[in-house]
Amino acid sequence: MGENDFFGEMAIFGGEVRSATVRAVHNARVLTIDKKNFLRGINEDPSLAFRMVQTMSSRIRDLNNEVSRRSVGDRREHRRFSVTVPVTLEINGDKIEGTLVDISYLGGLVRTAQDIQTGTQVTIYLPTIDHGIECEVRRKTEESMHGLIFPSPLLNWKDLIDPT
């Protein structure tokens, strides 16, 4: 998640306890809002509800894609790791700095300061290996967050997380 993102909306709409835990990687300022104030905000600015539904729709689509991907093959191959690893992406000879923030055996999410089109072929350079990995940008989940498909099998993720 990034600046101006929201979470916990399911608890407001459904009245149930939260379904996830959020941890800040860096310093963060978090605003909490109760249902009464949330509904007042939507009444004052109805486009707030539309933007929220857009984000929720995108999250549901991403979840459906993840479930679909996990249903194929050995589920142990799809373990995810939430880590922050600096990476360099190369697109047509141009190098773009980024951060690999969420990875699995079959891919990961990269945050970059520059937009990358879905379907673009890129080479990703990780700090723990000395060669690039050819991959494709499969989706854009939010501003500057891009899902990459890595070839399989990739590398030992333990070495990526703890290179000692």
Image: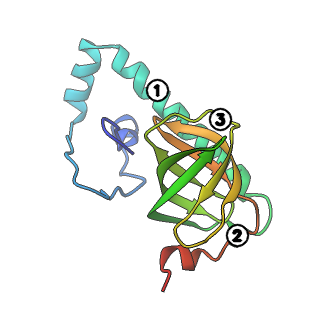
Contact (CB < 8 A) between labels 3 and 1? no
How far separated are the C-alphas under marks 3 and 2?
A: 24 Å
Between marks 3 and 1 in the image, the one whose residue lies nearer the viewer: 3
- Residue 101 at what x, y percent from top left? 47, 57
- Give the camera-side residue of 92 and 30: 92
Q: Amino acid at mark 2?
A: Glu
Between marks 2 and 1 in the image, the one whose residue lies nearer the viewer: 2
Q: Which residue is mark 3?
A: 118
Q: Which residue is mark 2?
A: 77
Q: Earlier in the sequence, mark 3 or mark 1?
A: 1
Would you place residue 142 above or below residue 156 in this image?
A: above
Q: Amino acid at mark 3?
A: Thr
**SS label for mark 3:** loop
- Residue 42 at what x, y percent from top left? 29, 19
Q: Residue at 61%, 63% (x, y): give it.
A: 104
Write down the quadrant of residue 70 in the picture: bottom right
- Tag of residue 142: none
Q: Which residue is mark 1?
A: 53
Would you place residue 81 above or below residue 26 in this image?
A: below
Contact (CB < 8 A) between labels 3 and 2? no
Q: Amino acid at mark 1?
A: Val
Left or right, 90 with respect to 70, comes to: left
Left or right, 16 with respect to 111, comes to: left
- Give the camera-side residue of 26 and 76: 26
